[in-house]
Each structure stands twice: as C-alpha cells, then as structure tokens.
Image (cartoon, rainbow, N blue to C red):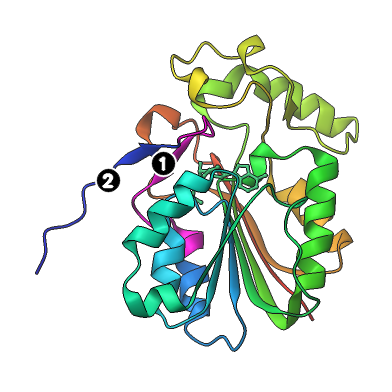
Amino acid sequence: MPPPLRHRRIPTHNQTGWASNQLNEISERFVAHCRSVALPVLDIGAAFGIATLAALETGATVIANDLEASHLSHIAHSATPDQARRLILIPGRFPRHLKLAESSLSAVHASNVLHFLTGPQLEQGFASIAHWLGPGGRLFIQASTPWQQPFKDFVPVFQSRRKEGAEWPGWLEDTKEYSTHRKLGQIPQSIHLLDDITLRKKVEAAGLQVDEAYLYRRRDLPASLFLDGRECAAIIATKL
Ligand SMILES: C[S@@+](CC[C@H](N)C(=O)[O-])C[C@H]1O[C@@H](n2cnc3c(N)ncnc32)[C@H](O)[C@@H]1O
C-alpha cells in the first residue's frame, strides 16, 4: 500500500491563496456524484486539479475552469491520455468568461474560490450555474468563513452587519484593516468571507434547492487558521 499522502498547500501562481493536495469533504462528495453522471461536470477555480483529476478518474467528462492559465496547464500535464480526452480546459474569470449551454452539466464544484467574488458576481454566478445544470444536477460549494484565526477581529463587524440585515455581510474591502497575518500577500486585498446563511439565501434565490448548508472545519485546513470549528461553509444544492 502506498504511504499516506502528506498534506501540503501549494501556493497559487496568481496570489489567490493556496491549493490543497488533498480532497476536502465537499470535493469528495462532488467526486462521488461524478460516478453516476450523464453530462459533463464543471470545476470552477480548479487550480492544479485536485478535484478535476479525481473526477476524471470516475470516468466523467470534466470542464476545468481557472483564472490562471498556467494552473490549467498543470492539470493537462497530469492527466493520463484517456483522461485528457475527457478534459476540457476553459481559462478565464467565472462567471464573466464562462459561456455554457442551458442544462448541459450534471454537476458544478466550487471549492475555495467563491470568496474571490463580489456579491454581484456571486449572484450572476449562481444564476449561470442554475441555467447550466440539467434536472437533478448538483452544486457543491466549499467556502471560507469569517471564523478563521487571521480574521477573528472582523467577526464582530460581520455579526453586526448580519444583524442589520446586510446583503453581503462578509465583504472585506481591505484585509490589512483586520489582520496582520504574515501571509496576507498571497491573497487579494479584498476578499469575501461567506457563511451558510448568506450562501443558502443566494443559491435559493437563483432557483436551486439547497439540500445541505452548514459550517465545519475541513480536514485539510491549516492549523494556523483554526478558530472555533466554523472556519468553512458547505452548500450542496440540486436543480429540480
Ligand atoms: C485557493 S485556490 C483553490 C483551488 C482548489 N479548488 C482547491 O479547493 O484547493 C483558488 C483558485 O481559484 C482561481 N480563481 C480565483 N478567482 C477566480 C474566478 N473568478 N474564476 C475562476 N477561477 C478563479 C485561482 O486562480 C485559483 O487557482
């Protein structure tokens, strides 16, 4: 038996955080769903392909999208010849640069990418996903919340915004205002910390049925981000 994979974070080439070399719990659910799909699946913010390559292993046709073309080249080099025939690479910014046909997908996966989008981009993105998914198609989201150690000073702001009914309480215009984390340079200046309540509302508004929405600590979260067990938000939804 091969030795267990050592957990490693791989810095993205475009300062959008780190990609994991281990599937998180939500990516694993996406891959399990891929075993029984009829249509292609989409991996948004695929980075170096941790979920894309696992989905290809199930036999699915996978569309891998990423803002950074060099990340997608890495996936192309890692795919076997059989997988390469079922791999479609689309570089560009979701949702603006992704044009797919109505009801053309069996699943959409977005892990650790939606916190790089503004509120209006997320709204547009969820509407696009609802349009692209065929009946029974599923959406799998893993996102970062404000309950992470580097952003703990932002939590009271987030909570008071949420109490006042803010539409997007987790938008953080300038991370330096609330955090002195030494690796802030590896993420954009503005980020959008998300939570189960906000995501559920917006995914439902796009017309999808939310099956699961919860906060948790993903298994590959670096210990330096641990706060109180609510570091991540998960959403699983279905197009009826
Ligand atoms: C932190 S990595 C996450 C990688 C992987 N999905 C995972 O779960 O480990 C974020 C990736 O999303 C990409 N990205 C950021 N904003 C994007 C957008 N609007 N559209 C497409 N890709 C985006 C980045 O280039 C980067 O590769």
Above or below — where is 119 with respect to 106? above
Q: Is residue 108 left or right of residue 170?
A: left
Most foreground residue, 152 or 239: 239
Predominant SS along the magenta part = loop
- Residue shown at 71%/21% (left/top)? 156
Report if residue 21 is visible in the image. yes
Name the side, left or right, on which 227 lies relative to 109: left
Q: Nearer the viewer, residue 64 or 190?
A: 64
Rendered image: mark on residue 141: none
Front in this rendered view, residue 104 or 82:
82
* Quarter of the displayed picture in which ligand 1 can be seen: top right
Pointer 2 residue Cβ closer than 8 Å to ligand 1: no
Which mark sits nearer the N-terminus, 1 or 2?
2
From the image, state whether disc 1 or disc 2 is nearer to you.
2
Q: Position of residue 173 (x, y in %)?
A: 74, 21
* Residue 105 against residue 66 in the figure, above or below: below
In front: 178, or 128?
A: 128
Above or below for 126 versus 41: above
Q: Which residues are magenta?
A: 13-27
Asked if residue 6 is among those painted magenta in the image, a careful observer would answer no
Label 1: state its secondary structure. loop
- Relative image position of residue 36 (x, y in whole percent): 52, 87
Residue indicated by mark 2 = 7
User: Label 2: few (<14), some or many (≥20) within 10 Å?
Assistant: few
Q: Amino acid at mark 1?
A: Leu
What amino acid is found at the position of numbered circle 2 in the picture? His
Q: Residue at x 66, y 38 (%)?
A: 116
Q: Using the image, tell me which numbered label, if any, was put on residue 221.
A: 1
* Residue 168 position within the rendered picture, expressed as x and y whole percent measured from the top left: 82, 36
Count of labels in the image: 2
Q: Residue at x 88, y 60 (%)?
A: 205
